[in-house]
Image: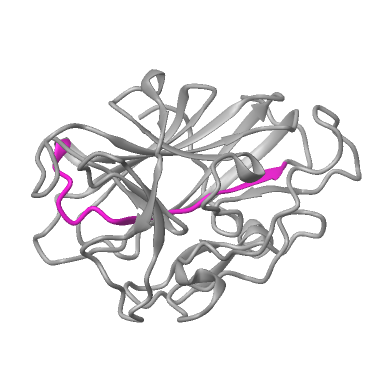
Amino acid sequence: MAGVARSLTLAARASLCVIAAAGCAPEVVIARSNQAGGSGGAPIVAGTSGSEASGTGAAPAAGGAGGEAGQVSAEAPRLLADSVADFSLEQGKLGWQYGYDGGTLDGFALLTRIGVIRDYVPATNDVWDCWGNDETRWTQIFQLGAHPNGTDTSEPSNAILQRAVRRWISTFEGDVVISGEMAKIDVAVGGSNGIDASVYVDGMQRYSAFIGGEDGGGLSYEVMASLHVGSTVDFVLDPHEGADHHDLSRFTAVIARSEAPQTQ
């Protein structure tokens, strides 16, 4: 496992995250947009039918990184990006891209089809819009997370590795804190052997964790990094040992300007 993860402090949780009861799993940390000048919008509460968190892509509009690119000032918003509130069915909006690769980020490509999450319906009966692949693959990215495609798969998919990759391209230069949560959504007993979730900064793995197939509680993560204008931050969901059965998972992210300089 590359990189060092630090546990979230209570203060960090209060400023960047909210504990929300999901309709399909135990309580987990879900990204929140409550920083003045940041992504904006109301808190995201998963599993609420008809709300911004229903997965329809109708999340509040975000304010972007704020200020001129590359400038660090007191006026720059603390919250730079929020994967939940910023989710869009438009590639590149607010710096976010939704894609996949074949095992390394060198092969990153954009997903091109808009659809809905297949073969899983939450307890709330919400329909979750998502990015998918033109080909027959399970590869999908939606507001709260993603589903990869594996070499051990099921019909109608073809057996090929496609890691689901949510990418943010920075317009900010400076030190940041990257935090969020990882958890299984589809927790069918014995259905999944788990998933591997990783965070990369400029192509270097900074954090990685395994989430068991029935682990609906999951875990939170925090990564310190220094970004430049044009830096890429990738959130990668990989089918554990290539098996993608019942791998729909939460994977959220908040990227915030650090209030004090951090060293990589």
Residue at (91, 45) in percent of width and height = 75
Q: x, y percentage for residue 119?
A: 20, 63
Q: Which residues are magenta?
A: 242-257
Quarter of the picture holding the N terminus: top left
Between 212 and 109, which is closer to the camera in this rendering?
109
Q: How many marks?
A: 0
Residue at (41, 61) in percent of width and height = 129
Residue at (27, 43) in percent of width and height = 148
Left or right relative to 165: residue 14: right
Between 102 and 28, which is closer to the camera in this rendering?
102
Is residue 247 located in the magenta-colored stretch of the structure?
Answer: yes
Q: Name the outermost residue toward the right.
A: 74
Between 256 and 142, which is closer to the camera in this rendering?
142
Relative to 117, does residue 201 appear above or below in the rendering?
Answer: above
Q: x, y percentage for residue 56?
A: 47, 66
Relative to 54, does residue 196 appear above or below in the rendering?
Answer: above
Quarter of the picture holding the C terminus: top right
Relative to 236, does residue 27 appear above or below in the rendering?
Answer: below
Left or right relative to 73: residue 212: left
Is residue 145 located in the magenta-colored stretch of the structure?
Answer: no
Q: x, y percentage for residue 170?
A: 66, 32
Res. 175 image quadrant: top right
Q: x, y percentage for residue 230?
A: 66, 24
Residue at (64, 58) in percent of width and height = 16
